[in-house]
Image: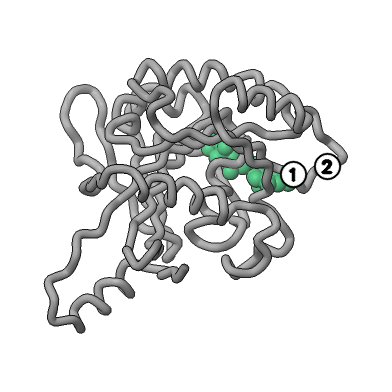
Amino acid sequence: MAESGSSAEFSSSLTSSSLPPPRTRIFKIIVIGDSGVGKTCLTYRFCAGKFPEKTEATIGVDFRERLVEIDGENIKIQLWDTAGQERFRKSMVQHYYRNVHAVVFVYDITNAASFHSLPAWIEECKQHALGTEVPRILVGNKCDLQDSVQVNTDLAQQFADAHSMPLFETSAKNPNSQGDRNYGNSDHVEAIFMTVAHKLKSQKPLVLSQPPEASGGTINLNRGQDDGGDGTRSWGCTSC
Ligand SMILES: Nc1nc2c(ncn2[C@@H]2O[C@H](COP(=O)(O)OP(=O)(O)OP(=O)(O)O)[C@@H](O)[C@H]2O)c(=O)[nH]1
């Protein structure tokens, strides 16, 4: 499976071909869970290939994307990193639940409260028409902090089984992960998102456009700047 680090790289390879460019399918995957569980770190790790040096609470939603090749097809995986804090997410919810292909629920294995919040996150998804028909996975993050575990694997597995989701335990901060996304895969971050992409690819084709521009009402979305080649764009809410 080959990977491409940027859409610019991809575009230049297309112009060298005499064939019309194929449409790139975009898979929109939303990443949901309490504040501080590591959603930003996991999505950054997959898209930029490393653990971020510093993160701040997400305001509204950030999306990061990465082009991958699966079975000869270029696919853009678009990860929507949602704010865990209620005050930073309330007016954005309607926007990021649209046209979702898969949902990744994240909890922190060192924080039992983040695990106990999962039913509420699942319920919120259901209220936005994202039930069991949409691929969903459960991720227990921060496995590098083994001395502080509050949610054991058996309990998490029971929960995952009860909700028909596969469970992955991982760490966005695996020491082998710095700087090279292909080096050291024992933490599963790569496997988690690629598993979802493979599953989506085998389902009916879906093509999405880029996220919507401001659509009126009381919500004002601001398109932010790229933050230095990691594929992140921010969609903040000025009314938060
Ligand atoms: N030890 C360890 N720390 C982590 C890991 N993942 C994230 N963190 C830390 O946990 C804190 C919160 O991480 P974020 O990725 O910002 O959390 P979030 O879920 O995006 O939070 P919100 O944006 O508020 O919803 C940061 O200090 C990270 O450095 C991990 O796998 N291991």
Q: Residue at x 41, y 52 (%)?
A: 64
Whether residue 32 is visible to the viewer of this picture, yes or no, is: yes
Q: Position of residue 42 (x, y in %)?
A: 57, 48
Q: Quadrant of residue 24?
A: bottom left
**Are the two marked residues, 2 and 1, in contact with CB atoms closer than 8 angstroms?**
yes
For the residue pair 58 and 240, the one nearer the viewer reads as 58
Q: Quadrant of residue 45?
A: bottom right
- Which numbered circle lies on residue 143? 1
Callout 1 amino acid? Cys
Q: Where's the C terminus, which quadrant?
A: top left
- Which numbered circle lies on residue 67? none
- Against 100, residue 120 (above or below) is above
Callout 2 amino acid? Gln
Q: Secondary structure at mark 2?
A: helix
Q: Secondary structure at mark 1?
A: loop
Q: Residue at x 23, y 23 (%)?
A: 218
Mark 1 crowdedness (10 Å alpha carbons): few <14, some 14-19, many ≥20: some
For the residue pair 1 and 59, the one nearer the viewer reads as 1
Which residue in the structure is indicated by mark 2? 146
Relative to 164, 125 lies left or right: left
